[in-house]
Amino acid sequence: MSGAFKNCRTVMVTGASRGLGLQIVESLASGSYSPGKIIATARDPSKAKELQNLAGKYSNIHIITLDVVSQDSIEKAGDQVGALVQEEGLNCLINNAGINVVADFQTVTAEKMLDNFHTNSVAPLMVTKTLLPLLKRAAAGGTGMGIHRASVINMSSLLGSVELNWGDRANNFKWYPYRTSKSALNMVTRCMAVDLEEDGILCMALHPGWVRTDMGGPEAPLSPEESVSSVLSVIGGLTEKDHGGFLHYTGEPLPW
Ligand code: NDP
């Protein structure tokens, strides 16, 4: 990803306490062209020791409290991000925070569905709505689309693909809450892409691969470093042709 974030001044990552979010912050901070401000949000920063250590090492990491399922928390975080970025605005918002409520047809309940839906599909929309003035500020007067201007990256999943959940593949991961929450996130992404296009704000959904995090588990083939290296290269290379798209971490388009 060397140089991929060269023209990105401000980036914000939700769910940066561990897993992919933490790795994104670390890789951005230690990269050769590190953004001026890396805003790492966590719902309880006091418990995010690794993130705190990183912020002690890299002065461009700013930790802000954000519980993405609380509107009050989103608004408070929005004010703090605004005070940090000021006239620069926000070039790149990575909606990464997510949960996996495992339930199959037998065990699924309405509560489990709504719980997963709130964090994975509704929260990225509410966070983006609140940060819109800062994204618009970064986009104003710019040309083209990408992280040099303003962008919203929604961390989705291949498991949200309706088309791919068929045939042999349909026998694995019969997770109703998670799969449907990511399908809904994909539609949220597409709706926002339609609405924010005239402001020059790129919106897309990205599958990070199957990764060895708390969520991905120990059997996953990719390390967080491997995934995030590709994820940041893809994000760094986004242009108008990727607006409204759903991409694999390798950069290939995925079927909806
Ligand atoms: P982890 O479970 O390792 O980490 C999840 C992160 O989200 C944690 O930082 C957690 O914070 C945060 N989070 C959860 N709920 C909230 C909330 N209400 N407010 C703020 N933060 C919250 O997951 P990964 O790092 O593996 O996943 C990151 C993203 O990538 C998710 O959206 C996931 O769906 C997606 N993804 C992951 C894959 C994988 O194989 N790992 C595959 C495909 C997609 P806390 O520490 O406070 O709980």
Image (cartoon, grey):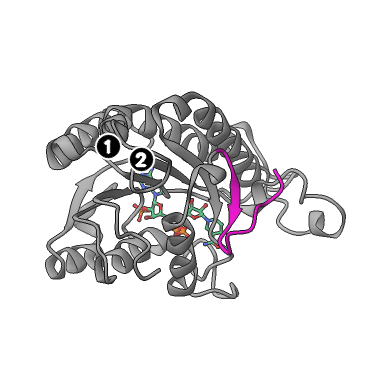
**Dominant SS in magenta:** loop
Please name the amino acid that badge 2 sits on: Ala
Residue 199 in the image, given as x and y percentages of width and height: 39, 27
Tell me if residue 80 can be seen: no
Q: With respect to residue 200, does 19 lie above or below?
A: below
Instruction: List the residue tagged with mark 1.
Output: 138
Residue under the point 40% across and 68% down? 1
* Residue nearest the viewer, comparing 152 with 78: 152
Please name the amino acid that badge 1 sits on: Ala
For label 2, the SS is loop
Instruction: List the residue tagged with mark 2.
Output: 150
Residue 185 in the image, given as x and y percentages of width and height: 56, 38
Magenta stretch: includes residue 250: yes
Quadrant of ligand 1: it is bottom left
Q: Which mark is residue 31?
A: none
Which image quadrant for residue 139?
A: top left
Residue 157 in the image, given as x and y percentages of width and height: 59, 52
Residue under the point 32% across and 56% down? 16
